[in-house]
Amino acid sequence: MNDKHGLLSAPIGRVLFNMSLPNLIGILTIYGGSLIDTFFISQLGTDALAAVSFTFPVAIVFASIAIGIGAATSTNLSRLIGAGNTTKAKSFLFDAMLLTFILISILVSVGIMAIDPLFTLMGANEKSLPLIHDYMLIWFCSAPLLVLLMVGNQGIRATGDTRSPAIIMAVAAIINLILDPLLIFGIGPFPRLEIQGAAIATLVSWLVAFTVSGYILIYKKRILELMTLCRVRITANWKKLGHIARPAALMNMMNPIANGVILAMLARADQAAVAAFGAGIRLETLFLVVIMAMTSSLMPFVGQNLGAGQHKRAKDGMMLALRFALVFQTLLYIPIYFSGNTIAQWFSSDPAVIDSLSFYIHVLPAAYGPLAIVIIFATCLNAYHRPMKSLVINLVRLFALMLPLAAVGLYLGGVKGLLIALPVTNTIMGIACYIMASKLTEPDSAHLHYNNDELNSSADSTL
């Protein structure tokens, strides 16, 4: 069995570190670019920053679909690779990319037609709505590139290679960083496009990254090939994708939906708080970047070990990651707390925005350790083929705890009361998820294997 990256045999800590480090560099570059993007847009004024903040939940809906399909793709591919079923892996990835393209094309068409009513419903005012319209028209056209790129990169990671996707996304972030000021402010020969310039910079960066990712999948990894459109094979593979992708995508969609509800609450209380919350969400992704990198490594690690029948090694890797996440995020909170006011002043000169964002930075990261436990455990449940349990955990966290507590907090303490509800929720769920993880049993063996008929049908379908 090919174990080039040591997922099945090397020391667990070393494997996760070696896989997570390139992920960390790539994700840090991406989110750093996103923060710089936010910084440039904030120079256009509070209205522009608020407008982009409104678009963030919608953008994450598309990313959530990519994460859902990507999770299903990575889970199944890593198990097939771990079991040595390369032919089946190729047909599975092709069918996953096909489904991704069809779904996103439909959503883009609906999204373009629904821009004004959707963001009006979310609480956008007359100043923000035209800016949102200008930004989202271009963003929707580039969304298929992003989602196909994310799913394709999960295919690369399933082989144990986390370095290539990290480089791809880092290059995309650098391109976006270079183009942002040129197109937003009209530097040199470039026209001043303001918020539209930010969207065009994003489109160009995703196009380049998508092209490079496709090249690696087809020519370097040889894990993606053109297949005949065999109904039997596609139906079987889409069914396997759906088992993980539907609840995984829905789980990830819950976060932007909840954020959208919180934004609507804030919009009716204080427009400056909307801008602060939008910047805070971007900061949160940066503060959790190490956890995101580790999560991307855990999926192929757990999947390949389960596929090879090494159940104890898979669980040991998960528990090691949970303990590391709690300690790391707790220690990271110390410098975050003491730099809160300075960071807030980077994003705005509006005293109201600075006050809300500073409070966000001081309070929410206190519970990022427990939140990291929730993120890691939910991801591992997908690898264990228990996506519904993962979905239920997120539903409880967001809709049974977070939003009700946020509404009570807003009523009793205004914007700050609402923000306090978020770390309280994450602490409760983090404790619950660690207890559940420690009691997690081996998966049903029926979920770990693919029968010979499926392998033969996929082999017959290759061009």
Image (spheres, helix red, strand yellow):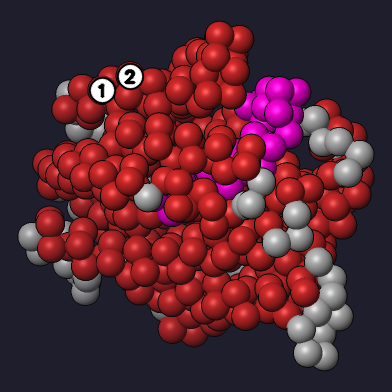
Identity of the residue drawn at 67% across and 31% down:
263
Per the image, the residue denoted by label 1 is 431
Tell which of 45 and 80 is nearer to you.
Answer: 45
Identity of the residue drawn at 73% across and 45% down:
50
Is-magenta flag for residue 134?
no
Question: Could you tell whether 171 is left or right of 135 in the image?
Answer: left
The amino acid type, in three-letter code, at marker 2 is: Ile
Identity of the residue drawn at 45% across and 52% down:
342
Instruction: Assign a secondary structure to mark 2.
Output: helix
Dominant SS in magenta: helix
The percent position of residue 210, horizontal first and vertical second, equals 61, 73
Is-magenta flag for residue 281?
yes
User: In the rendered view, would you say 71 is above or below 78?
Assistant: above
Circle number at residue 315: none
The amino acid type, in three-letter code, at marker 1 is: Ile
**Quarter in which the C terminus is drawn:** bottom right
Tell which of 21 and 408 is nearer to you.
Answer: 408
Per the image, the residue denoted by label 2 is 428
The percent position of residue 141, horizontal first and vertical second, equals 80, 61
Question: Could you tell whether 248 is left or right of 175 in the image?
Answer: left
Q: Magenta stretch? A: 260-287
Tell which of 160 and 294 is nearer to you.
Answer: 294
The percent position of residue 182, horizontal first and vertical second, equals 73, 80
> Mark 2 to mark 1: distance in Å?
6 Å
Outermost residue toward the left in this view? 11
Instruction: Assign a secondary structure to mark 1.
Output: helix
How packed mark 1 is, by other alpha carbons closer than 10 Å (few <14, some 14-19, many 20 or more), is some
Question: Could you tell whether 173 is left or right of 24 in the image?
Answer: right
